[in-house]
Amino acid sequence: MTTRPDATPALDLTDVVLELGDGDASVRALDSVSLQLDPGEFAAVVGPSGSGKSSLLAVAGLLSRPTSGSVRLHGIDVGDLSPAAAARFRLENIGFVFQSGNLIPALTAADQLRLAARLAGNRDLDPLPLLRAVGMEHRAGHRPGQLSGGERQRVGIARALVNRPSLLLVDEPTAALDRRRSEDVVQLLAEQASAFGVAVLMVTHDQEVLRHCDRVLEMVDGRLGELAVAEGGSAG
């Protein structure tokens, strides 16, 4: 982990409550959640389905506005941003890695990165250094259909790093991968967190990859707590 003792947290959630629905149908998806992540820190969130993990990523990624509490990214309170300002802030400061990679079928690996950069106003990106960083330079000219599941995830990680985000949000990156490729992808995330100084928050059900993380958090009924990581990678 690459952190500075005086670094402003990349992510700072304080007493965040998220209520979904109205009246008797209202559900408290997040219940007074507080979390700080430093630059370069890699944290995993585990917990049963429906416990609030996806809601946590949505609030941290400015996709959902909390009912109460504060969300700060590198010291900036983002709670009062307009939808347009939040979208611009998200594009410039947050990277997302999805379960399936969410790559565009018609684009090569290099063009996936170029498109992400253009959307942020950078038309001069050379995608090869980032593809090299994730071990995919030799596949730069290949489309998603020509890549394995693990290779698609590596391209997705490179694409998420295009704008040098301060926060990387990762949703079940190993769900469709075998054991070896799962280990490779999560180890790669840990390496990129350190190399780029980006804070990584990963939701996962995969207990075997937790040894690569600096911290393991558990979400139960909308509440977030810290877990110890046992030798060998399981949390308990």
Image: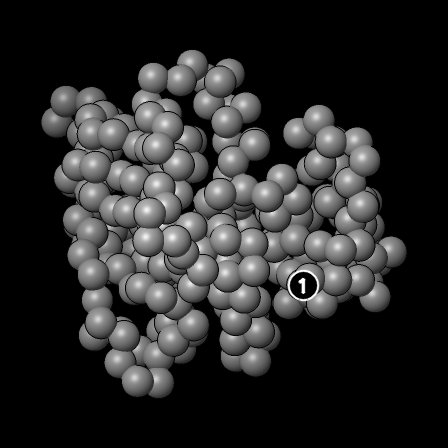
Q: Residue furthest left?
A: 24
Measuring 87% from the left and 56% from the top, which residue is drawn there? 141
Task: Please indicate whether residue 195 sits to the left or right of residue 65 in the image.
Answer: right
Mark 1: few, some, or many residues within 10 Å (few <14, many ≥20)? many
On screen, 67 above or below 14?
above
Q: Which amino acid does label 1 sit on?
A: Val
Measuring 75% from the left and 37% from the top, which residue is drawn there? 115
Q: Nearer the viewer, residue 48 or 16?
A: 16
The image position of residue 112, as x and y in percent, is 74, 45
Quarter of the image where the C terminus is located: bottom left
Task: Please indicate whether residue 11 sits to the left or right of residue 133 in the image.
Answer: left
Quarter of the image where the N terminus is located: bottom left
The image position of residue 225, as x and y in percent, is 18, 57
Tell me, yes or no, if residue 146 can be seen here.
Answer: no
Tell me, yes or no, if residue 160 can be seen here.
Answer: yes
Q: In the picture, residue 78 is in which quadrant? A: top left
Measuring 59% from the left and 43% from the top, which residue is drawn there? 164
Is disc 1 placed on a helix, strand or loop? Answer: loop
Q: Nearer the viewer, residue 145 or 61?
A: 61
Task: Please indicate whether residue 9 sits to the left or right of residue 116 in the image.
Answer: left
Q: In the picture, residue 219 is in which quadrant? A: bottom left
Q: Which residue lies furthest to the bottom in this view?
A: 232
On screen, 9 above or below 174?
above
Disc 1 target residue: 134
Colour treatment of the image: one colour
On screen, 151 above or below 161?
below
Q: In the picture, residue 72 is in which quadrant? A: top left
Measuring 22% from the left and 25% from the top, which residue is drawn there? 67
The image position of residue 39, as x and y in percent, is 42, 50
Q: How many numbered marks have been drawn onto this rendered protein structure? A: 1
